[in-house]
Structures are given as C-alpha cells and as structure tokens.
Image (spheres, coloured by chain):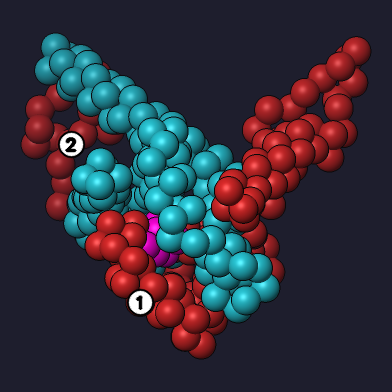
Chain colours: A red, B cyan
Amino acid sequence: MTDQTLTNPSLTNQGTTDQAVRSEFHPRWYRERVSTWWWLGEWHYLKFILRELTSLSVAWFVVLTLFQLRAFSHGLAAYLRFTDRLESPVMITLNAIAFCFVMFHTITWFNLAPRAMPVRMGGKRVPEFLVAAPNYVLWIAVSAFVGWLLLRTP
Amino acid sequence: MSMVSTGIASTGKASTSKASNEAFFWLLFSAGGVVAAVLVPIQLFLFGLAFPLGWLPQPSYEHLTALLGSVWVRLYLFVVCSLPLFHWAHRFRFTLYDGLQVKHLNEVIFAFCYGGALLGTVVAAYLLWSF
C-alpha cells in the first residue's frame, strides 16, 4: 500500500485515499513457477541440497545419543541391549550414511570459514586453505582427545 | 501523508525486531554448526561404526560410568546434544522452505523445528542430571 503511494507520483500529488490505490485491475508480475525438483538438474544445486540435508544426520546422531544415555541410565543390561541393537545391519547402514553426511558437513563448514572471514596480511589475501587449516588441526586434536578418553584402559 | 508515515514507521519497527530474532537463531545455528563439525564425526564413528563392527574395543560399562561421573563430561554431552539440534532446526527449516516451497506451512515448520530442538534439550538435561 505505502509503497505504491510513494512510487506512483500521480497518486501522491492528488492526496491519497485507500480507494485510489486499491484497484481491481492491479497488474500482477508474471513469475514462472519453479519445479519442486529444481535442485536435481545441476551438481551445484544438488551439492547445496545435500549440504542442507546434513542437518538430518546431525539430528539423527543426537537422537541416537539420547537413546544411548537413556539405556545407560537404566543399567548394564539395558545398555548391552542398546549396543547389541547398534550391531544390526540396518543400524550399521544408517550410521554409515549418517557418518558420510556428517563428514560432508564438517568439510563444507570448515571450508566456508575463509569465505565468511577473509583474512588479509600485508595487503594480500591469505590463501583459503591456510585460513581453513586451523579448523582441521583443532578438529583432529579434539577427535584424538575424545578417542583417547573412551579407549584408554583405566 | 501522516497515515503513510506511520505506516512506514510501524513496518520498519516490525522488520527490525524480526531481523534481530533471525540473528539470534542464526547464532544458535552457527554455534551448533561448529559443535557438529568438530565433535560429532568422532563420536558417530566410534559408537556407530567402530565399536559395533569390532574395529575397536567397546568401552566397558564401568569405564563409561566413571566418565559420566564427571560434571565436565555431562556438560560436554549436554552441549553436544543441544546446540547441534538448534543447528538442525535452522537448517532443516530453510531446507523445507526453499526445497519444497511450502510457504503456507512456514509457521508449522518453525514450531516443529524449534519445538523439536527445545524438547531434545530438555530431554538431554533430564537424562544427564537424573543419574
């Protein structure tokens, strides 16, 4: 409403009323309807959608962890039932797929950092892989620490 | 003209408050994205693949009990559960908005995504502080 009044000089000059702006025959822009499957045509679009779908694997991991914690809180027998269930081919397959997607998230997330925050040194832009590198170093160090916590024999 | 200017003022205000909400959700998305990128792969690899397939020895129940006895491990697990859920909520919301083009369902999707993330956070807190 207000946009029309401001952009249409003839209306502003006349002093506007609601009736003057709202017309039964107001033009509508022609917009082509985009197919629901627009992202299947090109690798870039597909990559974008796959990256967006990594969030499902992240959610899957959290739900799995919550079930694991629940089983754990119910005692040894319940926890062993849970770990047995994780050995089923269905769960292995689901977790393998989820792991691939989560890795895709990790890599795309780390590689995005230099684009979100371009670092300059001496007037020159630092190469992207050098900006992303600390992410990978941190990731490997943290992963090694978590692995060590779980695997060390007390 | 006075009618017009109040119109602009009110829409201006509405869009700023909406924008600041989006900034808050984006911050949660971003923090969750970092946590998911750094911490999820190793844990999913160990518990989802390496232990069940026998590539590495499964940690004993006693060992896990000892680990979960620490407040730091519980806090760590709380963060690992909660923030990635908010990351999921934001990203999945836009996947549904853009991917499926279901504009008329936007409010439902919003409630489902953030409601889910909030529920997961409450469940995580309950589980981690009840034993």
Tell me the subunit letter for badge 2.
Answer: A
Name the residue at 10% across, 32% down: A18
Disc 1 marks which amino acid?
Answer: Arg
Decide whether residue A62 is among the magenta residues: yes
Left or right of residue B38: residue B15? left
- Same chain assignment for discs 2 and 1: yes
Disc 2 marks which amino acid?
Answer: Val
Please state the horizontal and vertical placement of residue A94, each as a whole percent of the image.
50, 77
State the residue position of label 2: A21
Name the residue at 55% across, 66% down: B58
Do the numbered discs 2 and 1 sit on residues whose CB atoms are within 8 Å? no
Pick the residue in front: B35 or B70: B70
Left or right of residue A5: residue B36? right
Please state the horizontal and vertical placement of residue A108, each as a whole percent of the image.
66, 51
Please state the horizontal and vertical placement of residue B1, each as a whole percent of the image.
17, 14
Residue A135 at least partly seen: no
Q: Which residues are magenta?
A: A60-68
Q: Is residue A128 above or below residue B57?
A: above
Pick the residue in front: A24 or B50: B50
Could you give the CA–CA distance between mark 2 and mark 1, rounded to whole angstroms? 69 Å
Residue A95 at least partly seen: yes
Left or right of residue A22: residue A64? right
| Farthest residue, direction bottom | A89
Name the residue at 53% across, 61% down: B59
Left or right of residue A148: residue B70? left
Q: Is residue B112 above or below residue A115?
A: below
State the residue position of label 1: A81
